[in-house]
Amino acid sequence: MTSTLLRSQRPYDPADLSTLEFWSGTAADRERVFAELRAERPVSWHRPVANGLFVDPNDQGFWAVVRHADLVEVTKRHQDFLSGEGIVFESMPQELLDAGQGFIAMDPPRHSKVRRLLVSAFTPRQMARISDRIDANAKRIVDDIADRGEVDFVAEVSALVPMDNICDMVGIPEEYRRTVAHEAQFAGGWRDEDLMQGADPMTRLFEAVVTMRTMASELTAARRDEPQDDLLTALVQAEVDGEKLTDDEIISFFGLLMIAGNDTTRQSTSHGMKALTDYPDQRAWLAEDLAARMPVAVEEIVRWATPIMTFRRTAARDCELGGQLITAGDKVVMFYASANWDTEVFDSPEEFNLSRSPNRHVSFGGGGIHHCLGNQLARRQLAAIFTELLTRLPDIAVVGEPTYSNGNFFHGVNKMTARFTPEVRT
């Protein structure tokens, strides 16, 4: 029996995770569905996701992996579950996968070569080089809002934290930064009607990719001619066993950093501020000893935020997962937002608990060859901005309800008002 026939005969799960309505609801609404699936049907078959950007006539659905243990298993079985056909629900052209998703949409041996070279450049020395800049950027962000009393926290804080730091680390000139920040939004925001403003999603997404690649190509060529003390130069010069990164591989990684590296920290900062507002007892506990308690608190912030809600794999061959027969070519989607609330792993996961330890969240991935390369950078940035905010604006709090995006990839916060007592400057 062919894989296509098998798929056509499978009943779809009644808890439909494919609809726009499901992804337009609240995280709490989604969690009620995830909890039922974790308990009763941890690996379940669903209809193709609705409102996809690229319509694949052969797409008959996807497997939803919602339990922590099964998600970790998928990440570690990279021979069975491939990334090379895309990491999002939608089927996309290969050229867009290569241009917009970089090495996270690669499989061995190509992935192994590229990651080995990236690791050789993305070193603790690079982190140490910009450590002071991370603190300085956090201070500048708070300087700019401190006397105002009320701001759109997303635009004035969250969006600036990662972009400034990544631009510093990579070595992006000031004149490029505004363009990078603007174009990076469309990679994860093409479903967002407010952002798109009536533009055709496919056209706008390709425009963003072309703009980012053109900029990265110019900067890469410049670093070959005139090396600088930055990550882009390190990538150009990286060499392991006689191998170097190609320009195309560097350009793809540039795009990945600008998009994934930006959005993950941005969303974690926003969700973290909302949680610190909603759980004043946890905020008070953290404030008692910011320096000592911040590292463990950051882990809970990223678990709570789960900035990337889903990642997809594609089955390389017929295999078994969670008691289900997965057939070659099936889409297998990991639901990080569910795994981070799995009661088999977390005590009272619905509680924001900054002292949670151990905290086996999967917000940076579930291990395996695709574990987030920039996880220490993200942690460092979150610690810096929340230390600065809670020290200088101790009563900062979210007022009203945030506006959330309705995508199925990034756990996006579009707008969120924060209010505080203005800092008195002397």
Image (cartoon, rainbow, N blue to C red):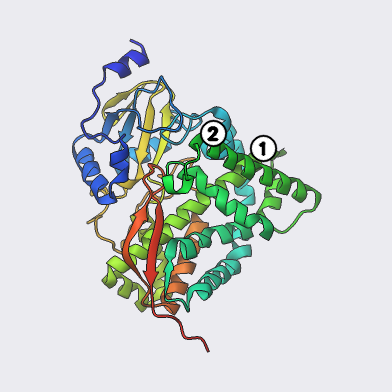
Q: Judge by depth and name the residue closer to the eye, 226 or 69.
A: 226
Tell me, yes or no, if residue 44 can be seen here.
yes
* Circle 1: element type: helix
Q: Which of 391 and 116 is in front in this view?
A: 391
Residue 363 spot, x, y in % from top left: 40, 50
The image shows residue 146 at horizontal and vertical percentages of 47, 77
Place of residue 243 in the rendered image (x, y in percent of width and height, measured from the top left): 70, 38
Question: What residue is drawn where x is 45% and y is 33%?
Answer: 53
Residue 371 appears anywhere in the view? no
| Residue plotted at (53% across, 58% down) | 162
Res 304 → quadrant:
bottom left
Q: In this view, does 150 lie above or below 49?
A: below
Q: Which of 412 and 9 is in front in this view?
A: 412
Q: Is 71 placed left or right of 148 in the picture? A: left
What is the residue that sits farthest to the front in this orientation? Answer: 198
The residue drawn where x is 54% and y is 35% is: 203
Q: Earlier in the sequence, mark 1 or mark 2?
A: 2
CA neighbours of label 2 inside 10 A, class few (<14), some (14 to 19), many (20+)? many
In the displayed orientation, state which residue is furthest to the bottom. Answer: 426
Dot 2 amino acid type = Leu
Q: Label 1: few (<14), some or many (≥20) within 10 Å?
A: some
Q: Quadrant of the N terminus?
A: top left
Helix, strand or loop at mark 2: helix
Q: In this view, does 111 lie to the left or right of 391?
A: right
Q: Distance between the residues labelled 1 and 2?
A: 13 Å
Q: Kindly identify which residue carries mark 1.
A: 248
Q: Residue at horizontal 41%, vertical 32%?
A: 52
Please tell me the numbered disc located at residue 97.
Answer: 2
The disc labelled 1 sits on which kind of residue? Asp
Residue projecting furthest to the right:
225
Q: Is residue 282 left or right of residue 366?
A: left
